[in-house]
Image (cartoon, rainbow, N blue to C red):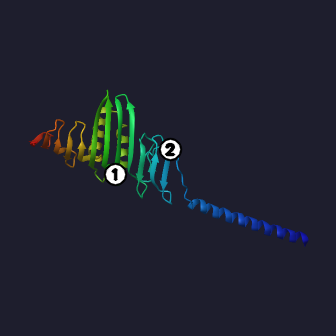
Amino acid sequence: MRTTAKKLRFLTAYATIMTVLLTSLVLFSFHKINKIENFEEINVKRINILENDGTIRMVISNKEKQHSGRMDGKDWEKRERPSGMIFFNDEGDECGGLIYQAKKTEKGIVAGMSITMDQHKNDQVLQLSNQEFVKDGKLTSQRGIHINAINYESKANLTKQLIEEANKIEDTKLRNTKLNEIYKEHTSKNLLFLGKTKGNSQGLFISDPQGNPKMMIYVDDKGEPKIQTLNEKGEVKDFLILEK
């Protein structure tokens, strides 16, 4: 009887201690989950912003760890992308971002910054960009707003798959022909550009739905204000130089 009583006391004490420990652990865990940490400074290579269910919503990263892109629940293969922020919608698909870089190449220095907004399941349709190219101490730049259009039936994953298949064609002429068909049908077309061109003109440049230039209202590199319309061949149809 004494042995049985001792066992009961031991089991009771053991159960009490384990209950207290488990309760403390649970409470401590919730406390840590809900606690807001404050930092004066932090060094980090990448930050992932997630929903409660794990859906990715934003990545802030350096270029080495930058997200490769995601569509239809699958990450794209690793590729080189500039540092910055990549945005993802409620479905977890990439939907835009803010990127920036300055790198040296064999042809010169390429630098710039871009804020983009993507069409659903596709590439960018609205972009604010600053593009710079430096060679032999001379700067060439394009800065402004781009508005693009993409056939909604041409999803990004489909376009990517078609390009990969076309690149497997061994015949160079046939491969290039196929790629040109894909780019014409499935990639974005610039409808409007407002800003400064590489030729040092600044103004409004408007194209048709196929991306062919149709109208330009601008001031050229010599300070001359001009209005031009173009025909189907890209030739100037109407031309007007405004008086200063």
Q: Quadrant of residue 132?
A: top left
- Drawn side of residue 53 relative to residue 32, left or right: left
Horizontal and vertical percent for residue 136?
31, 26
Q: Residues within 10 Å of mark 1 (few under 14, many from 20)?
A: some
On residue 243, which mark appears?
A: none
Q: Residues within 10 Å of mark 2 (few under 14, many from 20)?
A: few
Give residue 27's position: percent from left, percent from top: 64, 64
Q: Which residue is mark 1?
A: 117
Position of the C terminus by quadrant = top left
Q: Could you tell me if residue 91 is visible in this image?
A: yes
**Tag 1: residue type?**
Met
The residue pinned by badge 2 equals: 45
Mark 2: which secondary structure?
loop
Q: How many marks?
A: 2
Residue drawn at 42 percent across, 48 percent down: 85
Percent across and percent down for residue 188 are: 28, 47
Q: Is residue 171 above or below residue 183?
A: above
Q: In the rendered view, would you say 84 is above or below 33?
A: above
Give the x, y percent position of residue 70. Answer: 43, 50
Above or below, comparing residue 132 to residue 29 in the picture: above
Label 1 element class: strand
- Work out whether residue 232 or residue 190 is closer to the camera in this orientation and state it: 190
The amino acid sitting under disc 2 is Lys
Q: Residue, x 22% and y 45% (percent of image)?
A: 211
The answer to which of 7 and 216 lies nearer the viewer is 216
Question: Which badge, 1 or 2, comes first in the chain's sequence?
Answer: 2
The quadrant of the picture occupied by the N terminus is bottom right
Residue under the image location 85 percent in, 68 percent down: 7
Outermost residue on the top side: it is: 136
